[in-house]
Image (cartoon, helix red, strand yellow):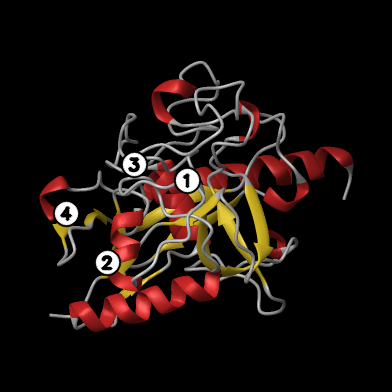
Amino acid sequence: MDPEGVHMKNILSRSALLALILLSQPLLAETDKSITNGIGMELQWIPAGSFLMGSDPTVDKQAVATEQPVHAVEISQPFYLGKFEVTQAQWQLIMGYNQSAFQGPNLPVETVSWPQIQQFFQRLNEKERTTSYRLPTEAEWEYAARAGSRTIRPWGDGIEEMEKHAWFGYDQGNALRHTHPVGKLAPNAWGLYDMLGNVWEWVADKYDHRYYTQSPSRDPRGGEHGEDRVVRGGSWNNAAEYVRVANRHYYYEKHRNEMVGFRVAKSVEER
């Protein structure tokens, strides 16, 4: 194909993606559909819908190959997502111990591995008499974090508003070398707090650095091989420019450190 034809094909591909998103824009999350479970976790209703996942290097100077290409993703089912990162008080109540590096009942739990979190969900589901609590998928996480936005961060492309929305920067930002109580900064448009900064959040997916090149467009579930798991959102230790909604990182699933916690998702149960 001649260069002009390639250029036109790229324009048409971008146009098709944009048309899909415009036709499938999710409704705003409905605050009257939020729920509180038996241990006081508040979860926000997240509607089904479509979005553009990943980062565009022509817009985002920090974009890397593992976040590309930008691709259309459909989240086919609504779900609930924790308004806040899981706190140490909630972890203690379910698990009976707290090994977080920074101690405080309303601080996000951290220094927890992916397998430990699976134990947490098993016990939480037993306590709540359900099977619906789980980690969000990577696609669900980014969809909820974007909350209908198409910018580098849910509030815009720049870092000027960062201190209003995220704990970041080690000692060069507002984090001051530690985590902070959940829910103290501004939420995103869907009422979710600390989606960026404070602690990285484990998600369900196995990590595959090439996954975006082969991801299914509907409800992607991550790679099929390896023992590394994806974390999203950045932490108190990250510089402002790296605290971005598309940023992907990973750890060996048994890894634990003071920068990584998680957030609860809940499938919508059949009535």
Question: CA gap, disc 4 to disc 2?
Answer: 22 Å
Which mark is first along the chain, 2 or 1?
2
Work out whether residue 163 can be spotted: yes
Q: Secondary structure at mark 4?
A: loop
Element carrying mark 2: helix
Name the image quarter holding residue 241. Answer: top right
How far apart marks 3 and 1 lie (CA) works out to: 13 Å
Q: Quadrant of the C terminus?
A: bottom left
Q: Amino acid at mark 1?
A: Phe
Q: Secondary structure at mark 3?
A: loop
Query: Which of the two discs, 4 and 2, sits closer to the camera?
Result: 2
Residue type of the residue flagged with mark 2: Leu
Q: Which residue is mark 3?
A: 182
Residue 43, horizontal then vertical, whole percent: 24, 56
Task: Please tell me which of labels 4 and 2 falls first in the chain.
Answer: 4
Name the front one of labels 2 and 3. 2
Q: Are marks 4 and 1 in contact (CB under 8 Å)?
A: no
**Badge 1: residue crowd in 10 Å (few <14, some 14–19, many ≥20):** some
Cα separation between marks 4 and 3: 18 Å
Q: Are marks 4 and 3 in contact (CB under 8 Å)?
A: no
Above or below 66: residue 115: below
Quarter of the figure with residue 270: bottom left
Amino acid type indicated by mark 3: Val
Mark 4 = which residue?
A: 34
